Image: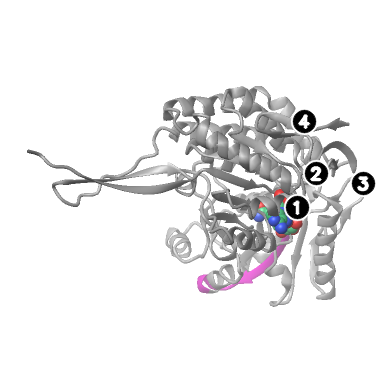
Amino acid sequence: MDNYKMLINGNYVDSFSKETIFSVNPGTKKSVATVPRGVKEDINAAVQAARTAFETSGWREIPPADRSRLLYKISSLILENKEELVRLETSDTGKPLTQAQGDVDVAARYFEYYAGVADKILGETVPIRNDILNYTVREPLGVTGHIVPWNYPLQMTARSLSASLAAGNTAVIKPAEDTPLSALKLAELCEQSGIPKGVVNVVTGYGNEAGSSLAGHSDVNHITFTGSVVTGTAVMQLAATNITPVTLELGGKSPNIVFADANLEDAAQWVVRSITQNAGQTCSAGSRLIVEESIQDQFLEILKQKMERLTIGSENADIGPIISEKQLERIEYYMEIANEENANMLCGGKRYLNNNGFFFEPTIINNLPKESRLFYEEIFGPVLVVLPFKTSSEALSIANGTEYGLVTGIWTSDINKAHWLASRVNSGQVFINNYGAAGGVEMTFGGYKKSGFGREKGLEALKYYTQVKNVALKFTID
Ligand code: NAD
């Protein structure tokens, strides 16, 4: 078992607490590593290092084209170290190899994408008067804090870190306590790329210790958080004490709306994939199926067959483990509710017991009562609930009927219906006859309603890692 240290100001250090946390592979229940149990003093040291790096390391003044080259270098280093990153990610999360490989590729792509824009962060000139040149510049914020979840540890760290660095900020990362290893490796690669010491720092530890200290730190200029609504609310409250802006990405209850005129084979393939990818532990999981009543039975039969063909396990399986016993129990709790409500489990509905880890069978549930909590709450497992509809208006009203609004999938061959729905659903992303558009580092991503606010990915994310300064220059000509 490896014993890791945190990276603060370019040094590998233990925590002030002198304690460690075990990282457990949920596919085997075996401890794979220890990391320091970072506490407030460690966060203070990391923020101080990031602040000093921002003010004095030259990072802020570096020509944007050079910053861009450093980000390209990080992207290349991620790919050169793919094997090790995959090993760390699979041992921390238990996820199948192909999924971890995909995550590493996406992480590299984030750095590549933002490398390409680091020298294109533009201001504007604003016409005012002939003797005044008025212009805006987009400046970095300073120190950004990144509180990362456990479902896509490397991808999520790369997502916000790459955009933040492209804009010229320095960073403190707090990975999830269940999955800290790939963030540590990524920080090491950032160091190797040649960025100044202290630009990227990682403090491992629990959310209510290291996480809350980072969220409430008075010298942090922005917090990016991905996770639950409850924790997001706590993070926002802590940040509010210092008027620190936050980007919150808080999950969803995203629907796939399937009309009778859709290509049902295509739709079924993506409905299954969108709820089973990463064992359903995906913020944008397609966890509600809103299906036209006339094809409900036929469509559910196709889904059931596809679900039952999926293999469960680690390494080469289709569906990997649930992250922890706690999360598995949470899914089981929702199954108890469904059983008490006399719902119909078309498949799954229970733990998968054929191996040692925390696995759950892919599940389809229909005939739930309208008020069932399973329609409204994020379960975060491979559990699909079914809601039939008769008219487009009814489909829209069901789709918009939760507190979330992250992603919507629409499946129909009628472009008018598709566009009508796309323009009315309360959701940050809409996919028509596809779901996810192959990952989409370039596509703006973020929530309506309680799915959060602020935007990540694409050019839009840069707005959240910069602040705009207006300069008015008065001049005279003799
Ligand atoms: P969480 O939201 O509590 O944890 C996410 C991150 O926040 C972790 O790094 C954690 O250490 C940190 N954190 C926890 N408490 C904190 C605090 N008080 N201050 C600052 N940081 C804190 O998520 P969880 O408890 O691990 O999972 C619970 C539920 O959250 C899941 O069942 C799922 O519904 C949801 N979730 C959503 C996503 C997503 O991508 N939207 C990711 C993970 C979890």
Q: Earlier in the sequence, mark 3 or mark 1?
A: 1
Label 2: how many residues lie within 10 Å, few (<14), some (14-19) or many (20+)?
many
The residue identified by callout 3 is: 354
- Residues at badges 3 and 1 in contact (C-beta under 8 Å)? no
Q: CA distance from mark 3 to mark 1?
A: 36 Å
Residue sitting nearer the eye, 332 or 422: 332
- Residues at badges 1 and 2 in contact (C-beta under 8 Å)? yes
Q: Is residue 279 left or right of residue 421?
A: right
The residue identified by callout 1 is: 209
The residue identified by callout 4 is: 87
Q: Determine which of the numbered discs, if any, sits on residue 37 in the image.
A: 2
* Pair 4/2: label in front: 2
Q: CA distance from mark 4 to mark 1?
A: 28 Å
Q: Earlier in the sequence, mark 1 or mark 2?
A: 2
Q: CA distance from mark 2 to mark 3?
A: 33 Å
In terms of secondary structure, where does tag 4 sit?
helix
Residue sitting nearer the eye, 249 or 308: 249
Please report the bounds of the magenta region as a residue range.
Answer: 382-393
Q: Earlier in the sequence, mark 2 or mark 3?
A: 2
In terms of secondary structure, where does tag 3 sit?
loop
Q: Earlier in the sequence, mark 3 or mark 4?
A: 4
- Residues at badges 3 and 4 in contact (C-beta under 8 Å)? no
x%, y% of residue 119?
Answer: 41, 32
Quadrant of the displayed image that contains ligand 1: bottom right
* Pair 2/3: label in front: 2
